[in-house]
Amino acid sequence: MNAIKVKQCSNCGAHFDCGDISPEKKCWCNDFPPIFTLSEGADCLCPDCFKNSCATKITAYVATISPETALDNKAKDLPKTTNLIEGIDYYLENGNYVFKPWFHLKRGSCCGNGCRHCPY
């Protein structure tokens, strides 16, 4: 049986469990979009720092997208994931899911429902 790897966040120093223990059992970080690599010399980030780093990078990327460039964006070509991530794909407002631009960009086209954060 494989043991869980305990790592220390290279950003905040917190200890956390890494789920990457075998080819069949991948880490929790694989649920996030594969949008960046850690800088040379850095190791893994804890779940909070990893989510914040992803959100920051996605926000910067989304800021470069216009309706004219949205159809040909990189997000739609990333491997599809089944898990939605609060703060990256959506946020909650009065108990309702509000999808963020990243969610729409991953879909690859406008659904025609007049979504608040539609980049198309």
Image (cartoon, helix red, strand yellow):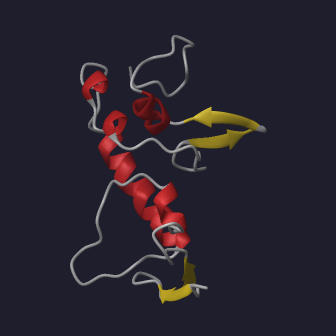
| Residue 2 lies in quadrant | bottom right
Question: Which residue is found at the position 56% from the left and 50% from the top?
Answer: 87
Is 16 placed left or right of 44 in the picture?
A: right
Quarter of the figure that contains the C terminus: top left
- At which x and y percent is residue 15? 55, 88
Q: Would you say residue 101 is visible in this rendering?
A: yes
Residue 118 to residue 37: above or below? above
| Residue 78 lies in quadrant | top left
- At which x and y percent is residue 59? 39, 47
| Residue 38 lies in quadrant | bottom left
- At which x and y percent is residue 89? 53, 42
Please name whichever residue, 51 or 6, is drawn nearer the observer in this view of the structure. 6
Residue 80 to residue 72: above or below? below
Question: Which residue is found at the position 40% from the left and 31% from the top?
Answer: 105
Farthest residue, direction top: 112
Please name whichever residue, 31 or 50, is drawn nearer the observer in this view of the structure. 31
Farthest residue, direction left: 40
Farthest residue, direction right: 95
Question: Which residue is found at the position 21% from the left and 78% from the top?
Answer: 40
Please name whichever residue, 20 or 97, is drawn nearer the observer in this view of the structure. 20
- At which x and y percent is residue 80? 45, 41
Quarter of the figure that contains the N terminus: bottom right
